[in-house]
Amino acid sequence: MVKNLSINVLKDAEINKIFIHNIVKELKKELKFDISGIIINFVNRKEIMRINKEFLDHNYSTDIITFDYSESQNKLDGEIYISIDHAASNAKKYGVKLKDEIMRLIIHGFLHLLGFDDQSQKDSIVIKKLENQLYNKYRLVIN
């Protein structure tokens, strides 16, 4: 288990917390960071829309929102909100298992915590390339 990592799951969602811990453990090794405190919240579409509107002033839904409270990129502190509804839709759309899509979203969230951004097209290409590399590497190891 990874220290200082909390996972909150909707009561009807089937999320394997050990699987999540294994992903984060691999990311910690690969990207060389420590965790001050990370909370990963699995929420529904309605809740992620509310969070997006209230805190980011975006009037649309999304698959992931990351809040970074870190004072250093070596010791991460933050919250990741993942829409289980969007993850399921994405998994179906791209023909992958739900747990693979969840892995991709967790990787994406941690890359944001490490300072990667996707606001510009150039930044989006960089984060997506790294996300794909890590996903392809870990899906063989963790699954």
Image (cartoon, grey):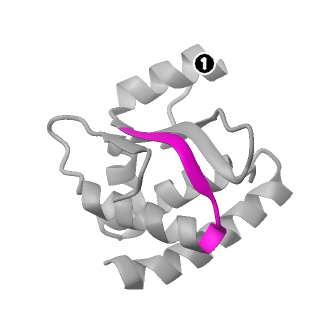
Rendering quarter of residue 67: top right
Asked if the stretch drawn in magenta spans residue 24, the answer is no
Q: Residue at x 50, y 32 (%)?
A: 61
Q: Which residue is mark 1?
A: 55
Side of 71 where 87 appears, left or right: left
Task: Give the percent coordinates (x, y) of residue 8.
Answer: 31, 37
Give 4 or 62, whichever is nearer the viewer: 4
Asked if the stretch drawn in magenta spans residue 34, the answer is yes
* Residue 31 is at least partly visible in this image: yes
Give 72 or 11, whichever is nearer the viewer: 72
Side of 31 where 120 appears, left or right: right
Q: How many marks?
A: 1
Task: Give the percent coordinates (x, y) of residue 42.
Answer: 35, 39
Q: Regarding mark 1 in the picture, which secondary structure is present there?
A: helix
Give the farthest residue toward the top.
Answer: 54
Rendering quarter of residue 52: top right
Q: Residue at x 68, y 38 (%)?
A: 70
Task: Give the percent coordinates (x, y) of residue 115.
Answer: 75, 50
The magenta-colored residue range is: 30-41
The quarter in which the C terminus is drawn is bottom left
Identify residue type, mark 1: Phe
Task: Give the percent coordinates (x, y) of residue 126.
Answer: 77, 65
138 is higher (above) or lower (below) than 126 = below
Q: For the stretch drawn in magenta, what is the main secondary structure?
A: strand
Q: Residue at x 55, y 65 (%)?
A: 28
Give the farthest residue toward the left.
Answer: 12
Neighbour class for label 1 at 10 Å: few (<14), some, many (≥20)?
few
Q: Residue at x 51, y 80 (%)?
A: 136
Side of 80 where 5 appears, left or right: left
Give 133 or 72, whichever is nearer the viewer: 72
Rendering quarter of residue 59: top right
